[in-house]
Image: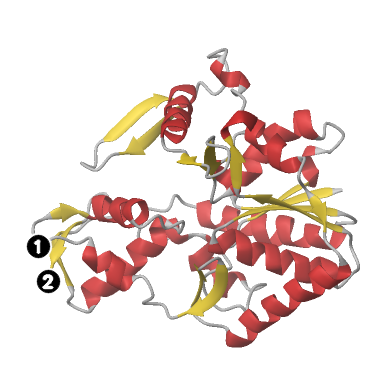
Amino acid sequence: MYWICFGESPGGMLKAARHSLAPELPAGHIVPLLDDLSQGDLAALDDPDARGDILCPWAVGMGDAPGQRDEYLRRHFQTSLPMLGQVDEAVIWYGDNARERCGMLYAVSRLAARGVPIWVVHADSMPAEAQKEPDWLSGKDCGMGVIGVVKNNGKPLRRPQWYLRWRVRRHLRRTYRRGRKTGHGTAYFASTGELSPVDAGYFYEKRRLLSHEECAKLVAEWETLCRENAPMRVLEDGRLCSAPEDYYDGLILSEVPVDDVCAASVIGCVIGRHQLHISDMLIYKRLRSLIAQGKVGVVADGETYRDLVIRRGG
């Protein structure tokens, strides 16, 4: 049995969750595929040169540490991808965002071709009564590392991980949508990376085995996206669609004011106000394109989007 997920955050969460959900599962049987298949050429998924800038967007003009990009590419192309050929039974974890949905389709297409039994865990919504407080709230000895969070004003807020996670969880509890029938709140997740290990248990219990017909349908959906091979794939009304590279440009421009503003603030507003579950680096890349087109002006440039100051117009 192997667990397959998409990205480092889901992979780290699952490594913590397996101790209670599947203690018999070796840590090495958790396979985090690091590539974002919602972006770029789908005809070159095994080519590090073609996929490098998508796999490592932070290494493009973001002050990449020496060797960091090479190590990241090695982990994906020499470790994670080859492991798909070893999978004898799979549990695929995914949420309702383009990256994880594309990853799920790709993994199903690879595994179904070998007749591998495929289970899926879909992280979508959870009723409030099903939620449990994670263990780290009862003791501050877990997750005591320090992490930085960039605020709208560009200044980092440094707090212990347990404190930040508690704040996020409290915010989620306050923003539950009201259920129509039961009146109870419901938490909505768009990514498996948003789950705590405790939350993961709720969805793991709801896992289901895909039928041959379901696998064939998912494989056909992936083949269609590969034939279209658009610059991007996006979710529209819950369905994956091919899209041009400027798909998000209108939303990005709508958040760029005529006054000077830090690009980090714009990126945060695009993701937050429009509830987009996409990479901050994708928005930064499009911002750079809009600057090149003269639609966004640069007041002060820098190595990262935290150092970039922009405004509307040339």
Report whether residue 21 is seen.
yes
Name the disc covering residue 306, or none.
none
Q: Decide if residue 40 is on the left or right side of residue 77.
A: left
Name the disc covering residue 258, or none.
1
Residue 88 position, x and y percent, is: 90, 56
Q: Decide if residue 296 is on the left or right side of residue 54.
A: left
Give the amino acid at mark 1: Val
Q: Nearer the viewer, residue 181 or 12?
A: 181
Report whether residue 305 is seen.
no
The quadrant in which the C terminus is found is bottom left
Q: Residue at x 36, y 70 (%)?
A: 248
Residues at marks 1 and 2 touching, judged by CB atoms closer than 8 Å: yes
Vertical relation: 135 (above or below) 208: above
Farthest-out residue, left:
259
Residue 239 position, x and y percent, is: 57, 70
Q: Earlier in the sequence, mark 1 or mark 2?
A: 1
Q: Nearer the viewer, residue 235 or 55?
A: 235
Secondary structure state at the residue bearing disc 1: loop
Residue to which mark 2 is pinned = 313
Vertical relation: 104 (above or below) 138: below
The part of the image, by quadrant, that contains residue 158 is top left
Q: Residue at x 35, y 51 (%)?
A: 272
Crowdedness near tag 2: few (<14), some (14–19) or many (≥20) residues, C-alpha within 10 Å: some
Give the amino acid at mark 2: Gly
The colour scheme of the drawn protein is secondary structure
Q: Nearer the viewer, residue 101 or 86?
A: 101
Secondary structure state at the residue bearing disc 2: loop
